[in-house]
DNA sequence: GGTGCAGTTCACGCGGTCTTGAACTATATG
DNA sequence: CATATAGTTCAAGACCGCGTGAACTGCACC
């Protein structure tokens, strides 16, 4: 896709790194970006992942200013990112005794982290979907003349949502994710003639 | 994060549907949109989900033109959406004997569907991340003076990625997702003074 | 009170993605 | 072969989220 920074050819990659790299070691940069990519893939902001990764790798709490410099972000941006992360329960704000500025530390218990996030984000969303589907089902049932087969499909979707929601809630409580029952219900389909693949 | 755009609350979802809904029954519209939202949340296009949902609910294969009308999409858009879905193995293109146009049918085996998608999308992505982290680890080890504690954290991240990748691959093979070993490794952390929430 | 630094908020612009619509190709039908 | 209909491709534009940077608040210390 983008590739207009490679005009120099494969010759000398490291020598002409744009400007100041802040202070990030190369290995840190790679790791931080990798996490950023995962997180983005998950539907969060890339930089949220990068900030968390930096804090996690460093181990010790950093100030907003340090993060700003290390990751080359703007002041305002860091502020918002940190606030988001704090709300997710993914970092913690700590005040060192003699220091005048806040510092931020990554939550290191990944299980707790994932639990938290699912609780605040996924669960609510899934519940919402489940409700919508239930509503659709209710409406559909109140109308005559709908082929039972279609209703069945709609019901299948609702129960899928219900199962997922249940599995998530259970995961939040027990930290154990069990999806065995979720998809089992749907192992292929009875009643519809299998189509041949083209 | 994204998600505050969907239709109204459970109160009046169907009442103020924009303009002409084509021919979609209200309950269909709700269900279709619900799926669209899920799919969008998952990182696909909203309309990909809507198209699949429509086909799934209808049961019988539809033509591109019908989809276009039902969901009020453009011709070109439908064409691309269908092609995407077909590549994912999420719908199938069928040619009815006497009909001159292609028709499209939803894959009804949800397990196979999810397997497919994970295979093409997630697995490759996770592998990529794993490789990046491994690279970072390699680089970090070749440099002296890095606190062992930091290396340990980096290693933790890599093994997490490895475990996830393994779990996914296993899921593709067996249709059984087992994450018990994935997060267990990370149950909290020794060495860092945890405590006090803000 | 004044100076300086930490942190927050927000309008704006950039960049990316999705959809459209029109031009084009392919395929059937008389 | 001519015509119509189905399907594809792609450039242009609409749309939307993100990060920036500047203005602002709050706080500490002199």
Image (cartoon, coloured by chain):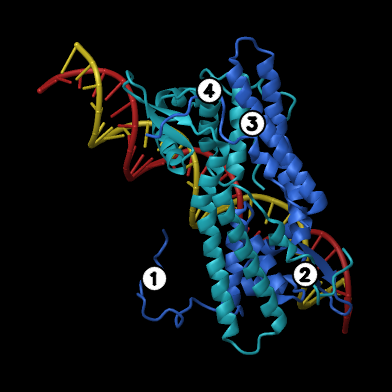
Chain colours: A blue, B cyan, C yellow, D red
- The secondary element bearing badge 1 is classed as loop
Q: CA distance from mark 2 to mark 1?
A: 36 Å
Whether callout 1 and callout 4 share a subunit is answered no
Asked whether B109 or B194 is in front, the reply is B109
Residue B124: give x, y in percent of width and height. 50, 57
Q: Which mark is residue A157?
A: 3
Q: CA distance from mark 3 to mark 2?
A: 41 Å
Q: Is residue A132 above or below residue A65?
A: above
Q: Which mark is residue A63?
A: none
Question: Where is mark 4, residue-wise?
Answer: B58
Q: CA distance from mark 3 to mark 4?
A: 13 Å
- The secondary element bearing badge 3 is classed as helix
- Few, some or many residues within 10 Å of mark 1 (<14, 14–19, 20+): few
Horizontal arrangement in the rendering, residue A127 relative to residue A24 (left or right): right
Q: Which mark is residue A105?
A: 2
Q: Chain of mark 4?
A: B
- Few, some or many residues within 10 Å of mark 4 (<14, 14–19, 20+): some
Whether callout 3 and callout 2 share a subunit is answered yes
Q: Earlier in the sequence, mark 1 or mark 3?
A: 1
Q: Chain of mark 2?
A: A
Residue A169: give x, y in percent of width and height. 78, 45
Q: Is residue B120 above or below residue B102?
A: below
Would residue B109 be visible to someone looking at this image? Answer: yes
């Amino acid at each position: 896709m983008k590739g207009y920074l490679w005009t120099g050819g494969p010759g000398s990659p490291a020598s002409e790194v744009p400007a100041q790299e802040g202070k990030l070691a190369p290995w840190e940069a790679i790791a931080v970006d990798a996490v950023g990519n995962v997180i983005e893939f998950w539907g969060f902001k890339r930089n949220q992942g990068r900030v968390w990764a930096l804090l996690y790798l460093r181990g010790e709490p950093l100030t907003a200013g340090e993060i700003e410099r290390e990751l080359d972000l703007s002041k305002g941006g860091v502020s918002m990112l940190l606030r988001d992360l704090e709300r997710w329960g993914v970092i913690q704000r700590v005040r060192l005794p003699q220091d005048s500025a806040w510092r931020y530390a990554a939550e290191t218990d990944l299980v707790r982290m994932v639990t938290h996030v699912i609780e605040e984000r996924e669960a609510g969303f899934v519940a919402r979907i489940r409700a919508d589907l239930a509503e659709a089902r209710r409406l559909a049932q109140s109308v005559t003349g709908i082929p039972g087969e279609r209703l069945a499909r709609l019901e299948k979707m609702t129960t899928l949502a219900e199962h997922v929601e249940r599995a998530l809630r259970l995961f939040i409580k027990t930290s154990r994710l069990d999806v065995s029952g979720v998809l089992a219900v749907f192992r292929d389909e009875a009643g519809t003639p299998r189509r041949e693949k083209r």
